[in-house]
Each structure stands twice: as C-alpha cells, then as structure tokens.
Amino acid sequence: MKYKENWDETKERFKAWWERSAIDRPMLRLVARRREPVEPLEEVISPQTPEALHLDVERRVRELRNFCRTHTFIAEAFPSLDINIGPGSMATYLGSEPNFSWDTVWYTECVKPDWREWGPLMYDPDNYWWKRHLELVRRGQELSCGDFLVNIPDIMESIDILSALRGPQQFCYDLLDEPEVVKDYIRQIDALYFIYYDAMYDIVKGEDNSSSFTTFQIWGPGKVAKVQCDFSAVMSPGQFREFLMPSLQQQCQKLDYTLYHLDGPDAIKHLDALMEIEELDALQWTPGAGKPDGGDELWYPIYDKVKAADKSLWISLEEGSVDELIAKAGKLVRRYGSDGLYILFPVMEREEALKILAEAERKWR
C-alpha cells in the first residue's frame, strides 16, 4: 500500500467496526488535497467514447495514481481501484447488452416474451462480457503492483438483476402474476452470484484473504460485499419479506462481512425487516437527490433502529463547512457512541482534515 501510511492500523479499525466496536474513536474517511504532488504526474488521455470511459483500465490506473500523488489518505481512508461495467454487471453476464453513457451504464431488457420461453439462467464461462470483465479485473490487479487495492466490482444480486433483465415495469407484473416463477429465478440468481463473486474475489483478495468492495470504501478480513435491492422502492413490505428476505439472508450467511445499501425514502419501509437479518453486519443510508446528507437529524430514526439491532452504521457527510461537518459528526457520536460508527467526509484541504481528526481524537470517544 504505497499511498497509505497507516494501513495496518486501518485494518484493525475496520475489524473493530465490523464487530460493532471501536478502538478509541469512530472510523473516519478523510481524503485531503496535497499542495504539491509527491511524484511526477502521468499524462492521461481523455476517453473518446463512453465505453472507454468505463472500461479503459490502463487509463483508470493512471488516473488513480495521479489522484494518489495529489492527495493523502488520512485516518481510515485508503486508495482503491473500481472496475465496474455499471451498477449490476451480472445482467451482462446473463444476456443483457450494456449501454454506456458518460455518467452510467444501462442494461438492455432481454427476457422476452416471458420467463418460460427464456429458460433457466445458466453460467456461461464464454459469455463475452463476463470474460472481458474478468480480464479487466486481472489487468487492474497486475497494474496495481500492490500499491493500492483493487475492489470487487458491483456485480449486484437477486431482484435488481431480474428487474434489469426483464425491465422494471414488466417485472412488477411478474411479481403479481407469476410469483412462483419469480421465486425460482431468484434462487437461480442466488446460485450464480457466488460463481461470479468468488471468481472476482480470487483475483483481488489479499494474502490474508481480505478484500475491499467498490464504491462504498469498505474493507474486511474475508469476503466483503454490499447487498441491496433498489427495486424494493416499489415493493410492499409483504412482498419484500416474501420474495427478498430469504435471498438476502442466504447471501449474508455465505459472505463474511455485509453492508446493506438502503437507497432513498421509498426503501425505508423495509428497514424493520432488514434489521431482523442476524447475519447482516452494517447499514449504509443514501438519502436521495434533493435530501439533506446523512448527518441530518431527519435520519436519526433510521440510525436508532440500526443501533437497536446491534449493527454498524455507515454515514456520509457531504454538506457544509468543516466546522459544520464537525458539528454534525459530533452529534452523531454523542447520540450513538463511537462503536460501530463509520463517518465519511468529502475531499478537503489537509488542514481541514487534520482538524477533524484532532477533534475526533480529543472528543469522539
């Protein structure tokens, strides 16, 4: 970890966070701009197409190295490389074609006219996008030279993949019209998920079998993943329990460390069910566009339930001056304690990051 000075200490803090404890303060992600690069910067040629933007791994590595040369990773922040074919690449391994844009990747609906005619979902080792994604991850690991982590990609799972394959609107009808068919396909996805996950994990895992997961800045001494169901925004609590809970529970049992990505106000209705999953370790809350960030008191009822269920919290603070960020973080620590609390801050100046760290070491215990 060339660009991370206190990596051994950081790993110990992550272990404590997963166990709903703390060493002497909450976990903090603090990334600060350097006044001068620590090494000469490499030339980076801008991508000419949206596909190159997402999949040119050599360029992505050069961009990350330049970022590491111009920034410092303080407290529990660490450098890592994301290599995603959008949010939910398993859809491409199963027949969907990705549509690349400058800000995301969309997936073409492919299950037509219905599930029965499409047939069972099968692992295809020769699928073009699966083979290409594996190669991209292998190449990223080679280019990293151990200087930074390479994250497990956002494969995604369960209902969100089925919705991508079928199309969200038609999948809503499927839940009502063919519930047993949908449940059978969920079981098929559950089995396939670990074929894909394990292959990626075997490429990027550390010598100690540790791993990190894309986007959410999480590391653990084993198999780590974010789990989710964004489609749950349009599901009733009864449907969530019937269709998704068995799948989620199985996934959490097979992984070593899991963080649930709760996305937007329409998903809050499922929080009680999620907190019943004993094997789920932590929750990450995304307020959604136009809503205040994770430090707002509006979201305390969510965090209250997470702490009552003895799970860890992942909270991103994004708005305000450094003093306002300190005030919001301080309120969180006073209400929930430092055990099992991970607070993430926006990129800032070094003096600001050190001010937050000093406050944490003095008062956030």
Image: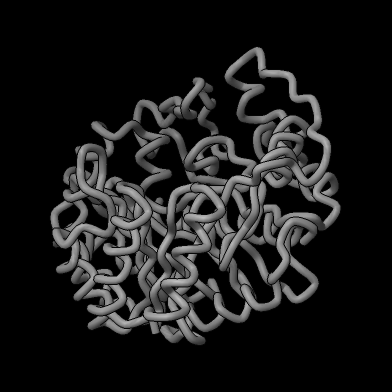
Image side of residue 140 versus residue 239, left or right: right
Quadrant showing the C terminus: bottom left
Examine the rendering and report whether any part of residue 344 can be seen: yes
Above or below, 253 relative to 165: below
Above or below, 137 relative to 60: below
Q: Residue furthest top?
A: 48
Q: How is the image coloured?
A: one colour
Image side of residue 8 versus residue 237, left or right: right
Residue at figure coordinates x 57%, y 67% from the top left: 76
Residue 77, percent from left and from top: 57, 61
Quadrant showing the N terminus: bottom right
Of 270 and 207, which appears nearest the observer? 207
Above or below, 248 relative to 129: below
Residue at figure coordinates x 41%, y 33% from the top left: 117
Dividing the picture into quadrants, the one containing residue 165 is: top left
Above or below, 228 relative to 311: above
Of 195 and 306, which appears nearest the observer? 306
Of 25 and 35, which appears nearest the observer? 35
Residue 47, percent from left and from top: 67, 18
Residue at figure coordinates x 65%, y 43% from the top left: 35
Residue 178, percent from left and from top: 24, 46
Image side of residue 3 versus residue 89, left or right: right
Dividing the picture into quadrants, the one containing residue 325 is: bottom left
Examine the rendering and report whether any part of residue 155 can be seen: no
Query: Tag count in the figure?
Result: 0
Residue at figure coordinates x 66%, y 22% from the top left: 52
